[in-house]
């Protein structure tokens, strides 16, 4: 039998609200109680979603606009689903069919949406800092859905929720983040979140794909999978972001897989109960072998996707608490 569902609303009514910021632009700078509370709220949304109940009154009358200047499957769909499950009116703005194609600037596009009184603006852009810029000019709460190589905060939150539910804790774990660190906003957000919450974070990959300054973020750098994965509780694989690469950063996909692709042989360096994560989209046979990606015991990749909806519901809920119209 399912445990009784304690409504997410009740969770925050019983305790102080730690997250008091208008926007969610980055993980960097968030404090452990803010992250912890977002994760607890998201956890209660997992239970709500699994119970089949809804909370459509929470964002009734609110408008959420998904403004994606880069492709997305998981993030855009889960924000849409999260908004709808909470009762918001959700609009997906297809940039390829918008006036951006006629030369309208990012700022003019945002000012136009602002004039329509949208409440929540979810933004993905290939330029680092674009959501921060928009947050300065719109009235809506802005959520960063991935900006250039800077941050992808909701991805790090859903990864942390997956880890917490699987391992029972976050603090004290050894997490190896492997692959294209240089171009990964997912890596940056995860490094900030996991070090803030007390993990030992390692980054593993070829020297060409690990910027020297990453060591300043409190991580240990490895260029060898055997050493980097030794004793790890969590192995997080990253996609090779060829679209952001300059030429010559990897020799060939085949050679990359030989040294850095996660297969069962390399996974054996980690703890026997280590979990395998990947934010998606995956390049099978490049950074991860299908046998590992589809391993029903070790891989939590599908669970990450489920957690994505719950985390985005929690973020929409939390941000709208400070900004509800017509409420005292
Ligand atoms: N992980 C992630 O951001 O996936 P999408 O690009 O499909 O949104």
Image (tube, rainbow, N blue to C red):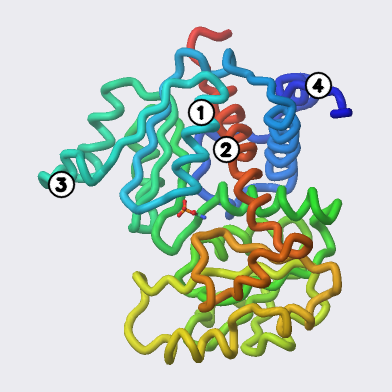
Check the image and name the residue furthest to the left: 102
Q: Pointer 3: residues within 10 angstroms few (<14), some, or many (20+)? A: few
* Mark whose residue sits in front, 1 or 4: 1
Q: CA distance from mark 2 to mark 3?
A: 29 Å
User: Going 44% across and 42% down the picture, which residue do you hit?
Assistant: 76
Q: Earlier in the sequence, mark 4 or mark 2?
A: 4
Circles 2, 3 touching at the beta carbon (< 8 Å): no
Q: Pointer 2: residues within 10 angstroms few (<14), some, or many (20+)? A: many
Disc 2 target residue: 312
Q: Earlier in the sequence, mark 1 or mark 4?
A: 4
Circles 2, 1 touching at the beta carbon (< 8 Å): yes
Q: Is residue 80 above or below residue 221?
A: above
Disc 4 target residue: 14
Q: Earlier in the sequence, mark 1 or mark 3?
A: 1
Element marked by disc 1: helix
Element marked by disc 2: helix
Circles 3, 4 touching at the beta carbon (< 8 Å): no
Element marked by disc 3: helix
Q: Earlier in the sequence, mark 3 or mark 4?
A: 4
User: Going 44% across and 49% down the picture, which residue do you hit?
Assistant: 73
Disc 1 target residue: 83
Q: CA distance from mark 2 to mark 1?
A: 8 Å
Q: Pointer 1: residues within 10 angstroms few (<14), some, or many (20+)? A: many
């Amino acid at each position: 039998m399912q445990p009784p569902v304690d409504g997410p609303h009740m969770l925050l009514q019983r305790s102080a609200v730690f997250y008091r910021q208008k926007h969610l632009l980055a993980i960097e700078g968030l404090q452990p109680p803010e992250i912890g509370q977002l994760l607890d709220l998201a956890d209660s949304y997992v239970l709500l979603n699994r119970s089949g109940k809804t909370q459509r009154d929470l964002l009734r009358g609110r408008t959420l606009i998904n403004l994606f200047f880069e492709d997305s499957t998981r993030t855009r769909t889960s924000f849409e689903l999260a908004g709808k499950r909470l009762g918001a009116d959700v609009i997906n703005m297809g940039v390829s069919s918008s006036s951006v194609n006629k030369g309208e600037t990012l700022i003019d596009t945002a000012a136009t949406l602002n004039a329509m009184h949208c409440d929540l603006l979810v933004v993905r852009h290939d330029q680092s800092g674009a959501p921060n810029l928009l947050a300065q000019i719109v009235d809506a709460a802005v959520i960063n859905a991935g900006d250039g190589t800077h941050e992808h905060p909701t991805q790090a939150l859903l990864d942390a929720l997956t880890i917490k539910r699987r391992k029972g804790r976050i603090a004290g774990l050894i997490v190896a983040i492997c692959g294209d660190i240089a171009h990964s906003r997912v890596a940056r957000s995860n490094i900030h979140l996991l070090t803030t919450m007390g993990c030992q974070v390692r980054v593993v990959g070829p020297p060409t794909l690990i910027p020297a300054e990453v060591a300043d973020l409190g991580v240990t750098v490895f260029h060898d999978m055997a050493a980097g994965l030794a004793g790890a509780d969590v192995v997080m694989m990253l996609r090779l972001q060829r679209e952001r690469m300059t030429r010559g950063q990897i020799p060939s996909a085949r050679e990359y897989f030989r040294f850095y692709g996660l297969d069962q042989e390399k996974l054996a360096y980690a703890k026997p109960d280590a979990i395998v994560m990947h934010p998606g989209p995956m390049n099978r046979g490049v950074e991860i072998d299908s046998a590992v990606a589809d391993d029903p015991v070790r891989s939590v990749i599908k669970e990450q996707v489920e957690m994505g909806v719950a985390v985005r519901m929690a973020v929409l809920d939390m941000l709208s608490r400070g900004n509800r119209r017509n409420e005292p």
